[in-house]
Structures are given as C-alpha cells and as structure tokens.
Image: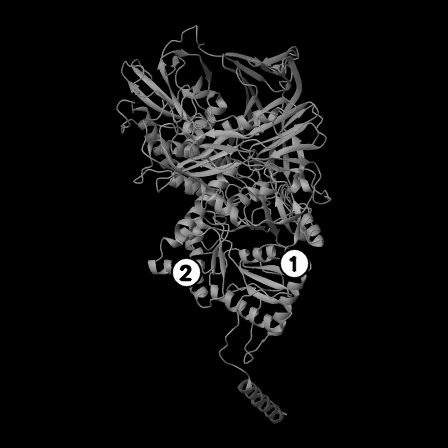
Amino acid sequence: MANNFEVWWLVLLIGLVGLIQNAESEYRVYDTESKIVPGKLNVHLVPHTHDDVGWLKTVDQYYVGSNNSIQGACVQNVLDSLIPTLLADKNRKFIYVEQAFFQRWWRNQSPAMQETVRGLVNEGRLEFINGGWCMHDEAATHYIDMIDQTTLGHRYIKEQFNVTPRVGWQIDPFGHSAIQAYLLGAEVGFDSLFFGRIDYQDREKRKVEKALEVVWQGSKSLGSTAQIFAGAFPKNYEPPEGGFYYEVNSASPVVQDDPALFDYNVEERVNAFVAAAYWQANITRTNHIMFTMGTDFQYQYALTWFRNMDKLIHYVNKDGRVNAMYSTPSIYTDAKYASNESWPLKTDDYFPYADRINAYWTGYFTSRPALKRYVREMSGYYLAARQLEFFKGRNEAGPTTDSLADALAIAQHHDAVSGTSQQHVANDYAKRLAIGYKEAEDVVSASLAFLADSSSKSGYKSSERKFKQCPLLNISYCPPTEVDLSPGKRLMVVIYNSLGWKRDEIVKVPVTSVDVAVQDSAGKEIVSQILPVVNVSMALRRFYATANVGKPPSGGPLYWLAFKAEVPPLGFRTYIVTSSKRAASVAVASVREETFYGHDESQNNAVEVGPGNLKLVYSGSSGKLTEYIQSNIKGTNTVKFSVDQSYSYYIGDDGSKDPPSQLQASGAYVFRPNSTFPIQSQEKIPLTVLRGPLFDEAHQSISPWIYQVTRVYKEKQHAEVEFIVGPIPIDDRLGKEIVTKIDTSIKSNQTFYTDSNGRDYLKRIRNYRSDWKLEVNQPVAGNYYPINHGIYMQDDSTEFSVLVDRAVGGSSILDGQLELMLHRRLLHDDGRGVAEALNETTCIPDGCKGLTIQGKYYFKFDPLGEGAKWRRSFGQEIYSPLLLAFSEQDGDSWNNFQVPTFTGIDPSYSLPDNVAMITLEELVDGTVLLRLAHLYEVGEDKDLSVPANVELKKLFPNKKINKITEMGLSANQKREDMEKKRLAWRADSSSDATKKPSRGGPVDPMRLVVQLAPMEIRTFTIEFGKKLSTTSR
C-alpha cells in the first residue's frame, strides 16, 4: 500500500513540474492606453485618495503618520509613493484634493522633484480636483469661510502650477448645499461637481430613474447662469462591489495573472469587473460610467493599486465587452458633455441626509457648539483684521493674518466645524485658531495704533502704542478694562466697524467700579448704563478663564458698563472711560432691579420689559413670556403677537432596542431622539428685570443648568436672548439634546425657511421632499435642517424670524413653532467611524465638568414681506461684530490720539443697504483682493431686491486705481476667461428655468462703478498707484 502511494505521488509531482515548465511565465507589458471607444460602455477608472484634514488624528498626525494606534494613515507616504508610480507608466492618472496636505509635502521637495511634479500636472496625469485647503463641510460652514478656504487652495495651485481646477469633488460631506452647487461650483469655474452622500431614499429613486446625474440649479436668483453638472455616486466614493480594493493588506483578491502560480484568476476578475460595470450602466445615462478607485488614506503604497489596475485595464479590454481606461473627473465630464444628453434639473439642496432608516445625520448641525461659535467668531475677526492690514499696509516680515487664514481654512473641513472629530482633534483645531488669532491680534493692534497716531499733517507713522483686546469677553473676562481708573487715568476704547455702513450699537465691557463715565471722541459725556455681572456669569468666568489662561481671574465685584457706540463705515471711533461720578442729566448710576417671584399667586399682573417701542410681556405669576408688542409699525399704533418660549431636551436613543444589524444610537453625526421632556424648575420661574436707559434685561434661571437673559434695546426692534446651558446632567446615564422652542400664533401650514450657508433661504415643508415621496421614520430628526444665519416662518400677514450666532440645527416640528438645538451631550457612539461618544468636558486643576456653552439668538416679528430687511442687515452685524481694542492713558488730555475717528472710505459715502464687502485683502504681490456681495435674492424685498451700484472711487478715495480685473470667485482666473470655458448643459426643464437673469456689467475703467444683481458676488483684483493723500478721517 505504501509503495503504491509513493508511485502515485511521484507521478503527480513529475506532472506538476512539467505543467509549470510549460506555463507562460515571462515579463508582461500591459496595454493601459486610455482612450474612449465609441459604441462601447466606457469605464473611467479614477484613482484617488480621500485625506481628511483631521478626524481621528490631527492634520499633522495624518500627514507624518504618527499616532497609528488610532488609525494607520500617512499622507506623506501617499504622495511619496505616488510620483514614481505615475512616472512608471505614462497612461496612469491620479487626482488630489486637499491642499492643506499637499503644501506640507510640496515645501519639502527638491527643485528637481518639483519640476517632475509640474510635468505630471501639465500632462494631466496628476490633476488637482476641488482644490481647496480642505474638503469643506456644507452644513455648518458660512459661505464666506467656504469662499476663503477655496481661494486659499486655488491661488496656491495657480501660483505653483498655473492651473485652475475644473471639477468639484465633495465626496464625503454629509449632505450637500445649494451654495456649494452654484457659488462654490459654477461661480469658481467648475464644470461639474461630484459627491457621495445623498439620502438613501432619494438615491434609490434616482437609480431607478437614471437621475443620479443632474443639472443642478442652486440659485433662483442667478438661475441658469450658475447651473452645474452634478453627480451622486451609486453607493459611495469607494471602488465598486466585487472586491477592487488594492491597498496593502486589503481583503480584496489581487489580479493574479501568472499561470505558473496558484490562484490564477484573470477570468474571474474580468467577469466581476464587467458585472460591476453593467450594473452601474443600468442606472446611468450615456455609455460612460465612473469607478472611484480609492477611499480614505489610500495609495500609501501606490504600486499595489496601479499594478492591479494596469492588469484590469489590459485584460478587460482584451475581453472586449467594455472599455476600461485610466481617467479623471475632468475627462469623464467632457465625455458626458460630448454626449449632448439632456439631464434632469435639480433645484434646492440635498439636506437632510440619512444613510438608512432611523439614521438622519442632523445631529452634527449642532455638535460641538463651542467650537462652532469659535470658528464663526474667528471668521468675522479675520474679515476685519484683513481690512485693517490693508489700511496699514501688509508687512511681509510679520505679523500677518496668514496663520489665521490657514487655521480657519483647516477648520472648515467636514470633520472640523461639523463637530465630528475625536476630542483631541477638536482641541487641535481650537489650538490652531488660537495661534492664528494671536498673530492677527498683533496685526489689528499695530494697524489701529498706526491709524490712530497718524495725523493728516504728519502723514502715516509707526506707533509705540499698544492696544489690547479681549477674546474672552463673552465670559465677562477682559483684563484691559478691569483696571483701576484712579484720577488721571483713562481707558481708551477704540471700536472698529468692518461693515460698509454706519452702525449704532450698544457696547458692553466689564469694569470694577460703578463710578465710571463715558465720553465720545469729541469729549462729550454720553449716556451709559451699569449692570451687575450676575452670579451665574461670575461662576462661568472663574471656571473658563482658569481653563483658558491657566489661572483664575482677579476677584472682587464686577459690573457691565454699557454705552451706545456710533461708528463710521470701515472705520473706528474712540470712546473714553473715566473714573467719575455720573452727571445726572446724561446717565444713571445703576439699573433698577425688579424681581417677581412666581410662587406668589398675587403677582398675576403682566410685566412689561423694554424701554422703547418694543415691549416683551411676561406673566407676573409664571414668569413666562406671553406677548411681543411693537409700536409704530407701518403707521399702526400697536401690534401684539402672542409668543411663548421654553426649553426641552430630547433623550438620545442608545439603539438598545434595535436588531444588531440596524443598531443606531444618537451621536456626533446622527440625531435620533428617543423621547422629549420639557425643562422646568421645581418651582415657578422667578423673573428678575433690570431696567436702564439703553436697554432692559429679563433674567430667568430656567433650571440649575440653564440661565437666560432676554434683552430689549431702546432703539432696536428685535429681542436678544442670551443663554447659558450646561453642564448637561448625565447622572441618570441618559444623553440629552437641548432645544429651545418659540411658539407663536402664526399659521405656518407645515412650512418654514432656512438659510443655505448664510446666503439664500430655502423653503422647507415638514415631512416632505420635493424629489421623492418621503417615507417618514424619524418625524423630528428627519425634519431638521442646518442653520447658519436664520430660520423663519410666515402666514398671510406676518413673518417671524430667528437669527443665530453660530451653526445650529433647527426645525418647525409644529405649526407656529420654531425650535433650535443649542447643545448636545451623548453617551454612545453612533457607529459612523469617530468611535467616541459626544461627551465634551472641560478641566481645570480642581476637576472636570461637562461643557457649558454661552450664546445668543435673536427674534423679531414683521409684516409679511418685510422681514428680509432685518434678517439681511442685522445678520451682517451678527457675523461682523464691532471689534473692540483698549489702551490705558495717563495725563490731563482727554484724548491723546491724533485721529480719534477714522473711516477708510469717503466720509460722505457708505455702501448701499443691499451690499456687503466680504473681502478686502492686500495680497503678497501687493495687489488687493476685493469682493462685493449683493445680500438679497430676487423678489425677497420690494425695495432692496434690485441691482446696486458701488462707487470704487469713493470706496478708495485716496488711492489711484491703475488696474482693476474681474476674477472668478476664487480669484484664480479672469472672469472673462472662465465664462468662455464654461460648459452649457442641457436640462429637462421649463422655459422659466432656462431664462438667464441679468448680471452686473463690465466695470468702466473711467467711472469705476461696480453693479451687482440680486445674490451676485463679484471678485476683483486691484492694482493701486501712488496714494493721492492720507485716508479719510
């Protein structure tokens, strides 16, 4: 038996040796020629990597490849391995997106390597797609930040490679905005836009109708002039199903084409490829489809990908059923355009996004609210700092605003301002903003000193004056104002206005004495108001000042000093605070305090709050807001509206009742409420009213962890609500999502309106989608939308609007009601990759606490059709708050500034009410970047939804404009050249959708007047000649 076995084994061994010797085992040259074959299905293989600018690791950890215990990812390896792999075959192609990473790699390359890479770019083998500093979020970002970060990347690419990206590539953000389509798509010169995430119900319907690819018209005001070809991927931004991942250690089968080795699988791999191609072709129009060959942080060893794709292209094309080719989204776009197909027309946006049942990604609209506020605050500050840097003149030796530009650009990433990164990464984003702010603060201080100490006779000169600022003013912490104003000492307050129109606003600063007075820049004492800093705010100040500066603030009493500042456009005015007994004729020593205790049933009379035409009425017995009374609206003596405001919390579902395959908790991304509970005090809410000549305040302790102050200003027609929320209690082991609700009698008929990235307003209808019949499984989360600017509702006579100070989520769950989610604290991960619960804490040496946030929102009633004026004008003031700087002064002179009042424009001029200057920046080459934005949509306001003119000679009265060039939105190409290259797509639509609205015409070089049509943003680079005289004062 043994002998027979040995003979059998010997025969088998000899046969195998013969088989191997006869097999074809030799060097192969793969035919990877990339060409479109008419009449065949053309499969465009697009090699790419998606590199998050921070998520589970920080941006620098991702770049260098450190902290790999969290995630094995190294962008430096991607770029290092990519270049030689592309050079090995002239047909290979690759696209790259995130310039925050690329510039880190680029600056460390030798001149020889840089020339090699430039050659690859010029040949189209390496193509920059999207091209921003990051792939920005589309829900929690403001349109100005989106423009700025895109401009930073686009100008960098233009400077280094003299190319302009053609295609938008927003493959990972969690829903997609109309602003992305028309403003950050068509208006930056993109021919197409591709993305990965749309609602699962929407995707299934579009697959059936072959409508994943559309012509997207995101702006009703700009209409067909800002259309773009847009495509949602069939599933995600990864390779197709069937096993086509080729990173080292991937589970997918490689293409094994050596017959001398086991597991030869060419036929099986070709069949799998063709099957995937046929499936996608059945849901796609034309004979062109795209395979996205890559995913997060792929190509760290690029050869493994290209080796297998070389083989696939070679053998698939030999098979002949389909044509496979290396491609890019630009090549794919041109092929689609050449087909002359007519495409479905898409309007509005792709929010909200759910990837399956019970999984609406609407929680991140609010996640990490403190970071969201910090980003918004730094955005407004960056706008002002660049203006001041321009007025003084950019100093290349430093300091500059560049560091803040970089930090803000990184913070727009779709896992940054979105609040969906791990905690240590969120800390890194905040750290970068703080470093950027510090350098920009030096720019602001130097610029203000330069301008304030330069007289028209002596001209500009450097100044030794040091201005200080207060980045923690929101927590009542401002060391420059908390000084002893003994006789002979004065506090100079310089207030800068970055808007193009004059502003009259109440300014508040903390002081240590009630015996202070305020003088204006002419030396006249003005009305001021003193209020106590309440205990809740003092506790917040102590804890968060210690957490931010490393030591507790000084003790002692603290007061708010409030006064009205009148500040010229793009300019400043100086005010002086002195130690003084107040003149009875112009000020009051303190506010009058009235407290109404709700448990006293005898106090059932109404309590009116407000020193001017607007009154808020509270119940003396319950302490609740009941009425909004406005006098003198359109000649009407008094208009009353019923209103109720409250707080509630949703319990975050932990998913414990779900089947294992559908487990879904509420987390950083996903909002999944389990139930809702009103937040009420054990007793009725005591109401404390502080009354003064400038404004009244209504203070309410809603619960031990919610405190609210509602302000009504004498000269304003809206209410301001300041809230302190946190730490959210979790002793019951339940995560909570905190909302405020405002109920009115408006008959809103399930309809409300939310902004798109702070710009256009979009109509929302509860439990409804315009593109498909919605299957409602989450009646709250599925009706939440991102809010960056505001939300409003209306009926046939009235509008009710709420404006916000940061990105939040919000909705109208009941008719007549608006709600905003203010804060979230959750105890479970939602299974979308971040692998952390959203449980933010802050620590000081004495211990850690859950995050407390402080913020504001504002509300107003208006007659139907008139609310836009307030939303647009006051919305600009929220985004661009007055900038305060402080300097102590000794001596008898009431003001030793040469220039106590300054404006950078003609003193007789201001921008039109419907126009904002959103960029004024001196660039490195000395040219100036100017952006002007029309603030109104077509038909939004009867007076202001009209073309507007801006007179550049008055905007720059003391400078000679030698040359002005209109650019695309991201300032990387001439507008004229961009328009000539624009592809005009055919859309299935009515004639109304294809009408081209008028836009502002060319700028006459003699008149120098810029015209803007509704919602138009125009971008210019300007070369100035010699100054005509000093800047206006």
Residue pictured at 35% horizontal, 38% vertical? 400
Q: In the picture, which quadrant includes the N terminus?
A: bottom right
Q: Residue 623's x, y, as percent?
A: 62, 18
Question: Which corner quadrant of the image does residue 1013 belong to?
Answer: top right
Q: Is residue 383 visible?
A: yes
Q: Amino acid at mark 1?
A: Thr
Confirm whether residue 426 shows in the render.
no
Q: Report the front residue among 862 and 710.
A: 862
**How many numbered marks are there?**
2
Q: Nearer the viewer, residue 304 or 286?
A: 286
Residue 547 x %, y %: 42, 34
Please state which of residues 31 and 398 is positioned toward the viewer in this rendering. Answer: 31
Element type where label 2 sits in the image:
helix
Vertical side of 88 occupied by 553: above or below: above
Q: From the image, which quarter does the C terminus lie in? A: top left
Label 1's element?
loop
Real-space CA distance between mark 2 and mark 1, rounded to the nearest whole angstrom:
33 Å
Scheme of colours in the image: one colour
Q: From the image, tell me which residue sits under label 2.
A: 119
In the rendering, at what x and y percent does residue 689 appear?
Answer: 55, 15
Q: Nearer the viewer, residue 271 or 422?
A: 271
Disc 2 to disc 1: CB gap under 8 Å: no
Q: Amino acid at mark 2?
A: Gly
In this rendering, is residue 927 above or below 620? below
At 44% from the left and 19% from the top, the residue drawn is 566
Q: State the residue position of label 1.
A: 286
Work out whether 968 lies above or below 377.
below
* Mark 2, other Cα within 10 Å: few <14 / some 14–19 / many ≥20: some
Q: Quadrant of residue 409?
A: top left
Which quadrant holds residue 244?
bottom right
In this rendering, position of residue 917 left or right of residue 580: right
**Circle 1 crowding by C-alpha within 10 Å: few under 14, some 14–19, many from 20:** some
